[in-house]
Image (spheres, rainbow, N blue to C red):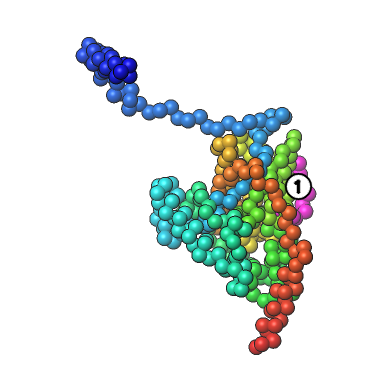
Amino acid sequence: MKHWLAAGLIGTAIFVFATTAPDAQQAAPRAAGAQAAPARPYVPPKTPWGDPDLQGGWTNVNENGIPLQRPDALTGKSVDELDDSELAEIVKARNEAAVAGAAAIGGRDTGAGPTHWYEHYGAKNSRAWMLTDPADGRIPPLTPAAQARVGRGGRGRGFGDGRADSWLDRSFYDRCITRSFPGSMMPAIYGNAYDITQAPGLVAIRYEMIHETRIIRLDDSPRTGLRNHMGDARGHWEGNTLVVETTNFDPRTVYQNGSPKLVMVERYRPVAANKIEWSVTMNDPDTWTKPWTFGMTLTADPEQPLFEYACHEGNYAMRNILSAARAEEAKK
């Protein structure tokens, strides 16, 4: 009864207000239609020395299955033009394809094993494709110099590709040496965890896959000139965004068959307490006709430790690859 009386009194008050204050009644719709104030951008906590604090465990597991370039089926669309329902349908199809292809992960005979062994099932993708610039979502054409490098030996081939006359015919990834960069950043069927640790003047990022660590110096110190599997990185802060420029890649492991001139510029932009928007721009005038950029979302995962990556410990993968190739040749 009290609730009914209160409602009646409120209704009477509104009616009296409406009949005695027409100007206020006309103003009400304008107030209701006014735009809400924009949400304030996320401001991350600070380290004791004053840098934005990005430390902790992160993962790209929900980015599994996102193609680097725009799929042909989505030609003519931009990432921003896809609404949530369209993206949901795309992600559903990707996850169904991942489950359907599970048996191929471990080879024809062994299969993949139970799905809980792997991390690429049920991914909640943040986007339809990764490449954001150029606007067509495609990697720019190769330069003539880059086309001449395609197929040239010395870097090792991809898994299952070409001959296996020697361990030198296998890629550095096959040989558990390195995934290089940004290969170590990209989602795979497992090993998608990172750890970011900061100190005054330094940021260290450890990658679970092959357990590589990048040391990013936050200064303008001269580069050594030595070429590394993951390049030589220098970083600085632009507001709350960590900007990292990396050069001096080892020619044998440089990304996408790039040249020694490759310069990669990354941005780590915290957008929520559990989200970092990561992007990287490739600038290599000896490889692509213009720079290009792609990115993905990193999600906080403090409960995910970096497991040991004992790639070749106790197994015979390289020996078996080579012996199988020789056995196949003997049949011919």
Judge whether residue 290 can be spotted in this image.
no
Q: Amino acid at mark 1?
A: Arg
Q: Secondary structure at mark 1?
A: loop
Any magenta on residue 226?
yes
Left or right of residue 83: residue 65 = right
Q: Which residue in the rendered view is the most extreme toward the front?
A: 1
Residue furthest toward the left? Answer: 19
Q: Residue furthest top?
A: 20
Image quarter of residue 179: bottom right
Write the residue at 61% across / 42% down: 300
At 54% from the left and 56% from the top, the residue drawn is: 121
Front residue of 290 and 155 = 155
**Is 149 rendered above or below residue 15?**
below
Above or below: residue 321 compared with residue 212: below
Q: Position of residue 182 (x, y in %)?
A: 64, 53
Residue nearest the viewer, comparing 159 with 221? 159
Magenta span main SS: loop
* Residue 109 image position (x, y, % from top left): 61, 73
Residue count near mark 1 (Cα–Cα under 10 Å), binned few <14, some 14–19, many ≥20? few
The residue under the point 53% across, 65% down is 101
Magenta region, residue range: 221-231
Image position, residue 284 (x, y; %): 61, 55
Q: Taking 7 as reference, is 89 left or right? A: right
Give the vertical position of 86 relative to 52 (above or below).
below
Residue labelled with disc 1: 223
Report whether residue 89 is seen.
Answer: yes
Q: Quadrant of the C terminus?
A: bottom right
300 left or right, relative to 131 = right
Where the N terminus falls, by quadrant?
top left
Q: Position of residue 191 (x, y in %)?
A: 65, 54
**Is residue 331 located in the magenta-colored stretch of the structure?**
no
